[in-house]
Amino acid sequence: MANQILRQRHAVLIGLTLILLIAAYLRFGAVNQTVVSNSLRADAGQYFSYAFNLKYRGVYSVARPVPHSHPRPDAYRSPGYPLFLAAFMGDVPPKFVGATPAKSSLDRIKLMLLRVTLVQAFLGLATVLFAFALFRQIVPPVWALAGALLVALSPHLVSMGTYILSESLYTFLCVLVMWLVAQTVRTKSFWVGALAGAVLAAGALTRPTLEYFILPLLVVWFLSGSERTRTRLVPAVLMGFVLVFSPWLVRNEISTGRLSDPRLAIATLQDGMYPDFMYHDITASFGHPDRFDPRSREIGASMNSVLHEIASRFEREPARELRWYLLGKPVTFFSWDIIAGEGDVFVYPVKASPYMDRPLFRATHAMMKGLRWPLVALCLIECASVWKRSHRDEPAASETMLVRRLLATLVLYYLVLHIVGAPYPRYNIPLLPFIFGLAMVPLLTAVRAVGRRYRSTASQPNAV
């Protein structure tokens, strides 16, 4: 028996090693062979400006890094990813001028960007590893390996590592925090719970959409957990979150006079109010309907103005708005193509990518694209069925159910958030590891049901 368990562990270790090698080949191959057109455009340029101003001027500001400027502090974007970039800013000369940098400056910037993407490739590997460890809490090892393989092969997760964007760091933090949550459920450790809360805050500081997840997470945990969870673990997670997240709010109040900048939230609501992401069904407006709306500035002037516009649209065309919000938005959110970007798995245009001409990359792309909707459907089945009461009273079974519920809470939280706001498919990328992992549960249940039926049929005597 002991030898059999040892052989199984060796087989799992070999399988995980092979998956990590595949993940490394894809991620480092993508970093080495992808050429992005203007890496520091749009969001990436803003992240770079924040990191540069923070490093060399001691001010957290999105203002362009130009000589002799005195940028004003702001809170337009959360500081997680700019702080990550600032760690690499030693490679960029302080005299860098955004408009016309010298060739030596450009070379050093390129070296800095290469180092960032290489580190993001390592974060991608860590994401695969922690995803396996997380999946192991809800399914047997072979199925956890299957989920980890999907994370390793995902073209979206691979491609995002080649951009100066927050997705790679944010996805890693999301997987890490949910693994820590699962460890807290298993070990009942106050300090692991506090660490989970701290990492959750770090994720919220990297992408602000996560900051409100602390509420449904703790509510579900409180209602589904034991007495010890209610009195010890939930407070531990909350304490870790507040300790890490609150300094950002204090800084904002001191530097900008308000706790947060509502502009991104307003833009998200405004972008999401146009059915099918088009202004009056004009095809050319797809993905950027606000640019075609002559009233765009008026609508986006404040939170009240955008909410009033949404309410007015529901009054004028309730059927169309309900169809868009309840059906169109979920379908759009989980879809494959990145709408607000170059398309397919690319955010910014690329001059070269292994997904264009390398056989293995193209094969994994085709496979994962074909599996997208079956995996999403299986994940949503799990998110719906996980709330039914379990008749199994074993501690291990109840802990597994709690972890499944908390993972489902994260997926449902994001779905509801983007039904309310803009359901750009790019925003589903950090959810992909959880979609893959949760999809394994109903698939495993179905395989076991078929196996039991087969064994039952085989054990029956043949009819005479």
Image (cartoon, rainbow, N blue to C red):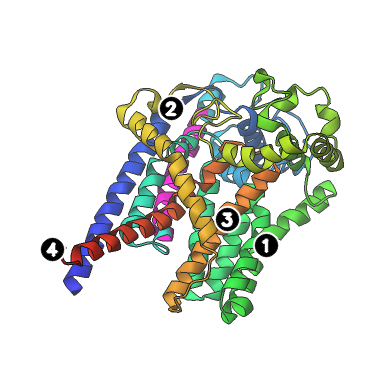
Q: Are marks 1 and 2 in contact (CB under 8 Å)?
A: no
Q: Looking at the image, is mark 4 or mark 3 nearer the viewer? A: 4
The tag earlier along the polypeptide, 4 or 2, is: 2
* Mark 1, secondary structure of its residue: helix
- Which residue is at a point 75% across and 35% down the rendered structure image? 270
Q: Is residue 435 above or below residue 399?
A: above
Secondary structure mostly seen in the magenta stretch: helix
- Which residue is at a point 53% across and 56% down the rendered structure image? 383
Relative image position of residue 16 (x, y in whole percent): 30, 53
Residue bearing the label numbered 1:
215
Please provide the residue range marked out in magenta: 110-134
Q: Is residue 458 left or right of residue 106?
A: left
Q: Is residue 3 above or below residue 307?
A: below
Mark 1: amino acid: Leu
Residue bearing the label numbered 2:
34
Q: Is residue 339 visible?
A: yes
Q: Are marks 1 and 4 in contact (CB under 8 Å)?
A: no
Q: CA distance from mark 2 to mark 3?
A: 32 Å
Residue bearing the label numbered 3:
410
Q: CA distance from mark 1 to mark 4?
A: 63 Å
Mark 3: amino acid: Leu
Relative image position of residue 282 (x, y in whole percent): 69, 19
| Depth order, front residue of 298/99 | 298
Mark 4: amino acid: Val
* Mark 4 residue crowding within 10 angstroms, few (<14) / some (14–19) / many (20+): few
The tag earlier along the polypeptide, 3 or 1, is: 1
The tag earlier along the polypeptide, 1 or 2, is: 2
